[in-house]
Every structure is written in C-alpha cells, then in structure tokens.
Amino acid sequence: VNFALMVAWCCKRYPKHQPYAILRIFFRTFATWSWPSPVMCCPIQETPPTGVAKMPAWNPRNPSSRDASHIMPIITPVYPSMNSSYNVGIPQKRRIQEELVRAVHIMGGEDGKHGDADWRSLFKPSDFFSRHANYLQLTIRGNNEEDFTKWLRFCESRLRILISGLEGPEVRAWPFAKFMKRDFTPEGGSVSEDEMDGPQEAVFFIGLRFAVGLESISLKKYSSDFLYNHINSWEGRKPGMDLLMAVVLQQDLPFDLIEQHVKSDESSEAATVETDGTSSDSDDEGKKENPKPFAHIRPTFSGQDL
C-alpha cells in the first residue's frame, strides 16, 4: 500500500510522462524526501461523506495523538485520512532510503546521464547477507501449522518494537524484510507420521553495526524488555510456541536456508565483509555509507546476553 501511494503521488504530478520516466522520478524523489513531511496525494480528508460516521483523521498537530511522532508518514487519500506507514521506525526508514539511493544511481543518478545501462540491476538479488559482520537471528517456532501461524503473526506484529529498541548510542539495526519458513524436528524428538502437520519455524534477520572502538557489549538490555513485556506475556501462547534469539557472525549464517529464499548472485557470492571499521567491497557505488561512528566491527558478547 505504501509504495502504491508513493507511485500514485508521482503519476498525479507527472500524468504525461512515460513509465520509465515515472520510475526514475519515483526513486529520485523519495531517495531525498524530507520526512517526516508527509506524502499526500490530496489534502487531508476530515469531513466524512454523507452517511459515514465521524472518525479521527491523521493530524500531527493534535497533542492527544501520536501522529506527530510518526517517522515516515504516507497518507491515505480517502476518508478518514490515515498514515499507512505508522509502524515504520528509524531503522526501517534508513533501510528503505538506502535502497532508494541505490536505485537512483542505477537509473542514472541526479542528471539521468550516468549509471548502469542495464536496468536489470534493479532486480538483482539482495546482498544484505554480505553487508554486515553481525546479525541478530530470531527463530519463531510452533508445534503445528495452526499454532505456528498464530504465533508467527503475533511475533511479527511486535518485531518493530525490538527493531526500534535496538537503536542507541552503541548499536544500529538493519532489518531484512522477509521471514524464511521451514519445517524442523525438535531436538531429541521426532514427528509422528499420524500428525497432519509437524513443527514449523520461521527465521528473521536483523543486521547489526556497532560504534567504532566498542570492544564488548551485552544485548540483554535490548532483548529482555521485548521478551518479558511484549512476547512471553501473550495470553494465547501455548507450549511449543517459542522465540529464540542469537547473535550470529556472517560466516555462521544458515546459508542453506537463505539460498532457498534469496536467489544467489555472482556478485553477492564474491562479496566479503571488512572487519576494520570500513564498508565492504560489495557496497554498490553511490549507496549511502553507514554513518560514522557505526561500522562492521565485531565486538565480543556477554555469555548470557540473550
């Protein structure tokens, strides 16, 4: 919905442009958009149509609402006008804008005269798993398909709290916007052939970067509040519904699983991550560098941090 509204914004302002021009305008416009200035296809709709009950519309000037705190507002064009991206935090916004900047470079930069001639570069597989030295791996499990689906949806609805909570003076987070599902056999157990469906799990990854010079860190302060106050207290939780968290180095990632969900690419396979506080050779030219003082360092972690 969010990207559809952003495309509609471009089409409304350039109705006679060809599709390729609209695409270039889209990336160039939103790579440099001054959020939290809202993206609006039309003025805020505050008056309800005939026969429709009065409902609150998005209003950042209302002191009793949280609208003023929204990071990346994209406003729906129908009554009641609402921010369709209310759950986007600083890490998600940073990740989106990095990709928009990369697309601007591929499609010719600011003047449209430079960049890759082959637009297929826009659709190359993500190199997310070669960009960072450290990752937070979250594994969500359920004993059967029904329990797993309910548990996954609940955990997914709370992940933005964890991602935003990871942002601080020592840590920056880069979420990968995809769950990777697979069947699994519980440790020391087996799946009965009589069961209609067996245990399932989904894995989610968050890239981590740390302040330059940081030698050790405990992530317990970031994970404890999330687990105790937002996950473990859910009344619908059943035995077998688990969420596991672990810090994983790049070379220890489950690449067999990742390759099933992210198509391999020669350039990403050859990519490596530097460990001297600089960006890796795999970073595309024109892509925003990770702002100092955060970089690809590998601090040590406390034994019980998660």
Image (tube, rainbow, N blue to C red):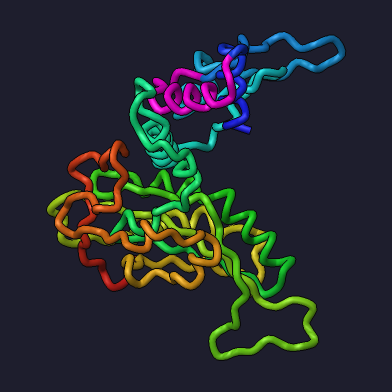
Q: Is residue 189 above or below residue 155?
A: below
Q: Is residue 107 above or below residue 233?
A: above
Q: Is residue 93 above or below residue 147?
A: above
The picture places residue 40, in percent across and down from the top left corner, at: 57, 16
Residue 293 vs residue 23: left or right?
left
Residue at the image position 64 percent from the left and 18 percent from the top: 57
**Quarter of the image where one finds residue 190:** bottom right
Residue at the image position 35 percent from the left and 72 percent from the top: 252
Residue 172 vs residue 266: left or right?
left
Residue 165 vs residue 41: left or right?
left
The picture places residue 30, in percent across and down from the top left corner, at: 45, 25
**Closer to us: 26 or 266:** 266
Q: Is residue 29 magenta?
A: yes
Q: Is residue 43 magenta?
A: no
The picture places residue 130, in percent across and down from the top left corner, at: 34, 58
**Quarter of the image where one finds residue 240:** bottom right
Q: From where the camera sits, is residue 24 visible?
A: yes
Residue at the image position 31 percent from the left and 44 percent from the top: 284
Residue at the image position 41 percent from the left and 36 percent from the top: 117
Q: Residue furthest left?
A: 213
Residue 173 vs residue 161: left or right?
left
Q: From where the camera sits, is residue 93 visible?
A: no
Segment tinted magenta in the rendering: 17-38
The picture places residue 183, in percent across and down from the top left corner, at: 62, 75
**Closer to us: 29 or 33:** 29
**Image quadrant for the N terminus?**
top right
